[in-house]
Image (cartoon, rainbow, N blue to C red):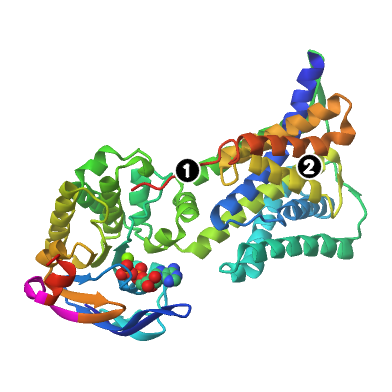
Amino acid sequence: MQTIGQQLINGLSLGSIYALLALGYTMVYGIIKLINFAHGDIYMLGAFWGYFVINKLHFNFLFAMLSAMLFCALVGVIIEYFAYRPLRKSPRITALITAIGVSFLLENGMTYFFTANTRNFPQAIQTVTYHLGGIQISNIQLLILGTACLLMLLLELIIKRTKMGKAMRAVSVDPEAAQLVGININHTISFTFALGSAMAGAAGVLIGLYYNSIDPLMGMTPGIKAFVAAVIGGIGSVPGASLGGFLIGLLETAVQAVGLSAYKDAVVYFVLIVILLVLPAGIFGKKTKEKV
Amino acid sequence: MLNVKDLVVNYGAIQAVKKVSFNIQQGEIVTLIGANGAGKSTILHTISGIMRPVSGEVTYLDHPIQKTAAPKIVQAGISQVPEGRHIFPGLSVQENLQMGAFLRKDRAHLSQAYEDVYQYFPVLKQRLNQDAATLSGGEQQMLAMGRALMARPKLMLLDEPSMGLAPLFINEIFEIIQAINQAGTTVLLIEQNAKKALSIADRGYVLAAGEVKLHGTGQELLTNSAVQKAYLGG
Ligand SMILES: Nc1ncnc2c1ncn2[C@@H]1O[C@H](COP(=O)(O)OP(=O)(O)O)[C@@H](O)[C@H]1O
Ligand SMILES: [Mg+2]
């Protein structure tokens, strides 16, 4: 019972990171039907930004995270503008290959300028471990969970309540009709990249704090897992991405807990295959029907 | 108010609109009628700025707009109700209306716009929080028109508003189009239901294979034997 509780805490902490990342995949896919393979690398950039501003500029954790979100939002907007926008009317495969190229560019660019070395992420917050009925929970885990939930709530409010959020949904479902009511598609897409990338930036700083180590390739595996999370949740669905992220986090922790660490990634893909066989559109995926 | 001159529009190698010219005076209802594939929707998309002409001119209130971006055209006062309605599924009725007023910043205008829309379409007011996708076809048409009205357009472009609707709804929609026109909005109406369209229009243009074949007042075209044969079922 205690181990289950313990694994639940660990799984939710990890899962909230995947959830934050999965949101970016799902929003970008929702609006331009592109799997942004460079998304995991934006998370890496967020972690490096956090590393530098905490070490060099002595930012506290909160400012490090907020500035990483801003920085990543800007990077996301720039990537969309230069790499994806010119391909908006090209076949989807062209944009997809470009996304993989952007990913390589970011990974190799960072390796070139900052070496491939793994660095220790500064302990901006002293770790305190609480013991609750035999379960250990650290203040870092609470911070990750709390921040992730807060950001997801904020995102949900932006998407559901604000005019830009509604415009995002309008462009996602019908870009032509959105233009006909005067919505600027380019602005809306930039806004979407900014939001998704900011989430990834926050996740990068949080993971740095949690695992203590960062390197230029750190975005690859979590990026793919978050993408799997978005697909499991139903790509394009925001609640689906959150749920998928938590599911993958819990699953991975559970697999490790029963001593199958070596297979944790394989299990994630296995579950992906099973879910897609049963629910081809994912858990919250929509099966749209035209109405006459 | 709107002057279209020698408009040519292509889809790749296909020439969909071939040197079409027509004009609309302030306060009129003008209709473009023609068979499926005649190029009617393409003309509307070009006016709205989501397609670019190969050549020709579109002049609105004495300004050329054929190179103007779609949001600017809405801002200038031209709103389109697209063929097939294209409401935003997943957004509520109210959110759909709000998107119609996307470019409007002035609150006083906005509340007046909502009032106008509810007056024309009382049914929408009862469905404000419902997902627009759950509306019936006729209600979706009303929502699409309401959404366009939210921008308080000077010129409203309607692309086959009666398509796929029950006769009862068709009559209601045509009455509302007349009411909107009487309240001061100029209307460009595209229809396959030529008889109904011509009966409410001041003037009409008959389009076939991307060209204007005939034009005249609504009454003239209604009684024209060629039009009767081709579009009014004898
Ligand atoms: N997206 C498209 N790609 C290629 N051809 C198109 C496209 N849309 C319309 N067309 C062609 O352009 C012509 C005019 O179409 P359209 O303007 O939709 O006619 P209408 O609205 O009068 O039915 C038709 O021959 C049609 O096949
Ligand atoms: Mg058409």
Count of numbered tags: 2
Q: Position of residue B114 (x, y in %)?
A: 26, 49
Residue underneath mark 1? A160
Q: Label 1 is placed on what type of residue?
A: Lys
In the image, B146: left or right of B179?
right
Chain to which the residue tagged by mark 2 belongs: A
Indicate the quadrant containing the N terminus of chain B: top left, top right, bottom left or bottom right.
bottom left
The answer to whether residue A147 shows anywhere in this view is: no
In the image, A79: left or right of A117?
left
Query: Which residue lies at the image location 66% right of the left edge and 63% below the top edge?
Result: A93
Q: In which quadrant of this rendering is ligand 2 seen?
A: bottom left
Q: Position of residue A275 (x, y in %)?
A: 66, 35
**Residue A71 found in image quarter:** bottom right
In the image, B34: left or right of A213?
left
Q: Which residues are magenta?
A: B214-225
Q: How many residues crowd mark 2 within 10 Å: few (<14), some (14–19), many (20+)?
A: many
Confirm or reject: label 2 Cβ below 8 Å from ligand 1. no
What label does residue A207 carry, if any?
2
**Residue A57 found in image quarter:** bottom right
> Which mark is first along the chain, 2 or 1?
1
Chain to which the residue tagged by mark 1 belongs: A
Q: Please name whichever residue, B179 or A273, is drawn nearer the observer in this view of the structure.
A: A273
Q: How many residues crowd mark 1 within 10 Å: few (<14), some (14–19), many (20+)?
A: some
Query: Which residue lies at the image location 88% right of the left edge and 65% below the top edge?
Result: A112
Q: Position of residue A207 (x, y in %)?
A: 78, 42
Indicate the quadrant containing the C terminus of chain B: top left, top right, bottom left or bottom right.
bottom left
Q: Does the magenta run of residues contain A94?
A: no
Q: Does the magenta run of residues contain B215?
A: yes
Considering the numbered disc 2 on the image, is that residue within a helix, a strand or a loop?
A: helix
Q: Please name whichever residue, A267 or A151, is drawn nearer the observer in this view of the structure.
A: A267
Q: Label 2 is placed on what type of residue?
A: Ile
In the image, A121: left or right of B21?
right
